[in-house]
Image (tube, helix red, strand yellow):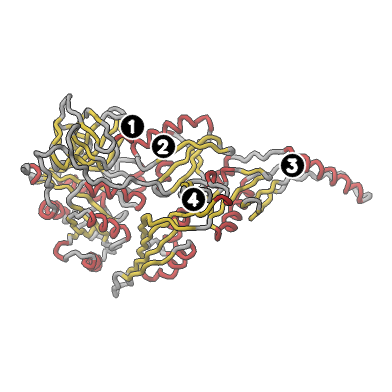
Amino acid sequence: MQSMTQDHIRNFAIIAHIDHGKSTLADRLLELTGTVQMRDMHAQLLDSNPIERERGITIKLAPVRMNWKGYVLNLIDTPGHVDFTYEVSRSLAACEGALLVVDATQGVQAQTLANLRLARENKLTIIPIINKIDMESARIEETREELETLGFVKSEILEISAKTGQNVERVLEAIVDRIPSPKGNLDSPLRALVFSSQFDAHKGVVIFVRVVDGSIHFDANVQLQFLASRTQITPIELGHFIPAMNSRPGLEAGEVGYIATGLKDIRMARVGDTITVPGMSVEPLVGYREPKPMVFLGLFPVDSSDYEHAREAMERLRLSDSAFSFRPISSLALGNGFHCGFLGLLHAEIVQERLLREFDMTLLATSPSVEYKVRMRSSDNELSIQSAAEYPDPSTIEETKEPVMRVAIFSPSRFVGPIMQLSQEKRGEQTNMRYQYVHTSEVSGMVELEYLVPLSEMIIDFFDRLKSITEGYATLDYEFFDYQTVEVGKVDILVNKEKVDAFSFLTVAGSVERRAREIVERLAGAIPRQQFEIPIQAAIGGKVMARADVKSFRKDVIQKLYGGDRSRKDKLLKKQKKGKAKMKMVGRVAIPQNAFFAVLKR
């Protein structure tokens, strides 16, 4: 039996490349449906985090329920940045349809294609929308052609301006007419998909759910169970997002809402799990892959007495960001800190910024690294190595593998040469090249280049340099491809012949000398001069690859001599040299905090 309410429900997401106008379109839909009063309206309403608002990007998905002409429209706003693709895949699993927004001034971009592929894999009904038609530089005709080459029919493409509100009402009509209603069975046992979660100080873990079959009605005796973790809960509140949480007595098949679980540990409520009633034998819903950290950094409190405060801050942050992981580590140079895993460098930056703003934690970050797989000679076991400190003795290693990403670069064709040069420099291997759309206008066609690039080469400055050589036009999408065999060296940095573990790094054979020289020169400029000369060396095993010296202060001991025999000068200089040598033996070099900042910052 299909309930009347399901016929009048539409669940949809908005997907697009970064900056193509998703959040602005969401704002207009909220206004048109009267969900938010004009006096409460502000730009990017669903981007609630101040960092999201400042950077103009969406990081965390936000669901909202709208009522329009007797229909319930559940919108799930999604992020556009490639680091947060896992959030997009979650949103799509809870929907029947998607609005694909394309900027008329830029046309189809790398992540437009990536998100379109995700939506088609989820068998969603897709409504193509050309946005920003009010802009002088809009290429409406060309953008329409681009969408047609992706398999859309001219008549189904909507042309709007989310900024001015032009034609946005047609989007609401298309959602109702084209996106199918949910097809859940109201009489079946409860099955609900957990598609996101957040932590609330009063309600514990709040899970965002899409009810697929059955219904939940709130009362003091109701018990629910997570199928995968077997955790049982007694919910303390149910409701919808409009867009703030609004409690309701129940949720039925086809609806999107939240359940406040009262749990204190977010790991017990895994995203992608299925919620049901204890004792019921039900088929789990298709969940999704857990987000896997790809980039690793060491984070150390600048003041060592802040260690406990930093640990509490990270525990609390992990409650609202399940993709962030950390574990305690210790360094001789930096004291106690944390080894942290992130989805990418933007994710790492945002976590550090949140720690600073929300918890007033200033942390020192070590150089970013990736996870290597190491097979030992003594056994067939594979070790996962996430930092230089964990790297075993090279003589015991049979094989080392590094992660490789499949990279899609979208760019005007005039930049093909510089892109190829950069990709080769970064050890990239070209797998495909397609000229997409060639026009007679000043935009002489787009090219899509596909490369396999090692992640260790991407995390340093790949994106910045790509933007620079293409005058900001190129866009990028990437996903994990595989591990490949590579020759890796562990470079140790010695200051006054003492190893400083915080500066050790792993690098591939070809770039050892360049990276080693870079680090010793930066250190030589950052360490203050002492009464004795300080050698700074980069070494692999016992072999020194690069060296720079911090010159000593030199007192002019022969200043008081006027003429006379040369041997008097030599005697004084020899005495000074002996004193400096003695000092060097007993003198320890204290590396100041700013030297760590100078070397470790990207």
- Which is in the foreground here, disc 2 or disc 4? 4
Q: Determine whether the residue tagged by mark 4 lies in a helix, strand or loop.
A: strand
Whole-angstrom CA distance, mark 3 to mark 4, is 39 Å
Q: Are marks 3 and 4 in contact (CB under 8 Å)?
A: no
- Give whichever of discs 1 and 2 has the lower sequence position: 1
Between label 1 and label 4, give the one nearer the viewer: 4
- How many residues crowd mark 2 within 10 Å: few (<14), some (14–19), many (20+)? few
| Residue type beneath disc 1 | Asp
- Which mark is first along the chain, 1 or 3? 1
Q: Quadrant of the N terminus?
A: top left
Q: Are marks 2 and 4 in contact (CB under 8 Å)?
A: no
**Front position among marks 3 and 2:** 3
Q: Nearer the viewer, residue 1 or 126?
A: 1
- In percent of width and height, residue 463 lies at 42, 57
> Which residue appears at 9% of the width and 38% of the height?
187
Q: Amino acid at mark 2?
A: Arg
Q: Position of residue 528 (x, y in %)?
A: 65, 43
Q: Which mark is first along the chain, 4 or 2?
A: 2
Q: Residue at the spot x=31%, y=57% of the render?
A: 111
Residue type of the residue flagged with mark 3: Lys
Number of numbered discs: 4
Numbered disc 2: secondary structure = helix
Distance in Å between CA atoms under marks 3 and 2: 43 Å
Identified at 42% across, 45% down, the residue is 348
Q: Which mark is residue 357?
A: 2
Residue ID for mark 3: 584
- Tag on residue 301? none
Amino acid type at circle 4 is Val
Can see residue 348? yes
Gap between marks 1 and 2 measured at Cα: 23 Å
In the image, 543 versus 251, the foreground residue is 543
